[in-house]
Image (cartoon, rainbow, N blue to C red):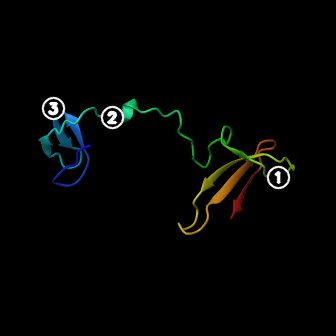
Amino acid sequence: MQFCDECGSMMHKQDGEMVCQSCGATAASEDSGEFVTTAEQDTSDVVESSEDANFEGKPTAEEPCPECDNDTAWYTIKQTGSADEPPTRFFKCTECGARWREYA
């Protein structure tokens, strides 16, 4: 990986030389082997984390559902407060789909 001497941004290889993606400065390529690009990366291990994402396939915990008393729920963990506070666990019942949260 090579960074721009002018602005510090990451540079990419274009036509045999390195080009800054921010300011357009060019530099000789410091060819130290292979480059890895995002097109070559595998996304099969990415876990969806948007609020409306399905919980199915996420880890489960033995948590009693407040609606149907089922004892298994999918969960996600998010840092909702400041860094020195414990994270919040969000649950979804595997049986009825009820949702709730737990503050540690």
On residue 96, the disc is: none
Horizontal and vertical percent position of residue 36: 33, 34
Q: CA distance from mark 2 to mark 3?
A: 16 Å
Residues under numbered marks 2 and 3 in contact, where contact means CB atoms less than 8 Å apart: no
Label 2, on which residue? 36
Disc 1 element: loop
Q: Is residue 35 left or right of residue 5?
A: right
Indicate whether 84 appears above or below 28.
below
Q: CA distance from mark 3 to mark 1?
A: 60 Å
Disc 2 element: loop
In this orientation, which residue lies closer to the viewer: 85 or 91?
A: 85
Indicate whether 48 appears above or below 63.
above
- Identify the residue at image location x=57%, y=66%: 81
In this orientation, which residue lies closer to the viewer: 31 or 66?
A: 31
N-terminal of the pair, mark 2 or mark 3, is: 3
Horizontal and vertical percent position of residue 96: 81, 44
Label 3, on which residue? 16
Q: CA distance from mark 2 to mark 1?
A: 45 Å
- Identify the residue at image location x=65%, y=42%: 58
- Identify the residue at image location x=34%, y=34%: 37
On residue 64, the disc is: 1
Which mark lies nearer to you, 2 or 1? 2
Amino acid type at image mark 3:
Gly
Q: Is residue 44 left or right of residue 58?
A: left
Amino acid type at image mark 1:
Pro
Indicate whether 23 appears above or below 30.
below
Disc 3 element: loop
N-terminal of the pair, mark 2 or mark 1, is: 2
Q: Is residue 56 left or right of residue 15?
A: right
Amino acid type at image mark 2:
Val
